[in-house]
Amino acid sequence: MTAFRCLAAFALAVPSALQAGAGPAGAGQAGGGPVDLRGEWTQFLGAAVAGSGDKAARYGGRLDGFASIRGDGIGLWKGLTIELQGELLYGTSTNRIGSRLLLPVNSSLSAPPVKDVEADLSFSAVQRIGRTRIQVGKINLQESSSAVPIVGGGGKEGFQHVGLASPPALLAYPKIFGAILSAPAGRWVLSLGLWTPEDWTQRYTPEGLFGGGTNAMFVATLPARIGGQSGLHSFSLLLTSRQARVGENFPDVRPPPELEGAPQPERGGAHIKYSVQQYFWRDPANPKRGFGFFGHVGLSTGTPDILDWSMTAGVAGAPPWDERPADRMGIGYFRFSMAPRVRNALATRLPVNDEQGVELYYTAQVSPALRLTAHGQLIDPVVNAAPVAAYVGLRAKADF
């Protein structure tokens, strides 16, 4: 469960949802029953094959259960949907082994730390008024990002490394408590959000809301066509009034312990990002099947004063051969650049550089409900003296 936390990714998923008038599973729409239930079981087997540290194989997994309850189906009002997601994580993962890495290599098992078994529950109310969508409650941003075209999957599908599956902005946790509004404005889709900055992982009661500050976002997404193929361009601004120390346990990263003595950042911070998803091939017989380009560039300032800029670039989607129409593949590059003040604070104790890497995956559709993925990652760690790390793994995902 990587932390985003990737709010531009949330907004990239909104245009298709608004156009279809439905959530990720089409829940809460007229014509179905009052309750829509579904589940996912994702298993991971992987190992570090190059770098330093333990290279033993690791096995872990997660069970996700989803319930969408239509308001008018239980005696409430039309347009309301109550969304629930239960998660159970178990086993071990390849995160934090093999070399001194800043970012997790398995985003789906990155938080909370799995100690035998960990569980969590997200809950929110979604109200649709025409093409406007309002969501209030404990929102799972990782799950929202899984619906993003081309690069989406949230680590359970597609890319697994957090730098590609959910590029961190370090200002929002994987689970937040607040509200997000999305609505069309001409050709654009605008999203506004406001939430308490504390981590809501394994938290269910609202005591102390906004005691540590406030987080806010604004995202503008433009659907566009290039060469006759569809795409999305998104511009996002994420703001916080909180103050975060460099040595804190940030949502998506594990800074070197030497950072604990670094200067304390000022209160408040911002992250601005441009993201693109652009198809360059679509199956005329199946518009949901396509292959395209993705990328982003993000800039940060202020708290927590560890990220200077980040970027991704790659291609992913359905391979253009008819023999395996449901398979998927992708290759992507990420770079996470440390802030100059952090580099200077560590210069004499632990010289650091940008962390960067490449991931390649191929997903085979074994049956309508089962997908098997093989992936490999090659990563240049943030610590200059650390050797290049390499990881390989298998992932099996079953839907029910």
Image (spheres, grey):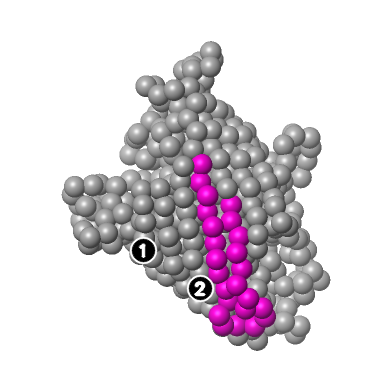
Residue type, mark 2 in image: Val
How many numbered marks appear?
A: 2
Left or right of 61 in this view: 320: left
Q: Residue furthest top?
A: 75
Label number found at residue 32: none
Label number found at residue 329: 1
Place of residue 218 in the rendered image (x, y in percent of width and height, measured from the top left): 52, 43
Label number found at residue 392: 2
- Residue 205 is one of the magenta-drawn residues: no
User: Counting other residues with Cα less than 10 Å from the Cα at mark 2, is it few (<14), some (14-19), or many (20 or more)?
Assistant: many
Image position of 348 with respect to 19: above or below: below
Q: Can residue 72 be seen by looking at this rendering? A: yes
Residue that appears at 50% across and 77% down: 378
In this rendered view, identify the residue nearer to me: 338 or 360.
Answer: 360
The answer to which image quadrant residue 169 occupies is bottom right
The boundaries of the magenta stretch are 39-62
Which secondary structure lies at badge 1? strand
Place of residue 288 in the rendered image (x, y in percent of width and height, measured from the top left): 29, 47
Rounded to the nearest angstrom, the CA distance separating label 1 from label 2 is 15 Å
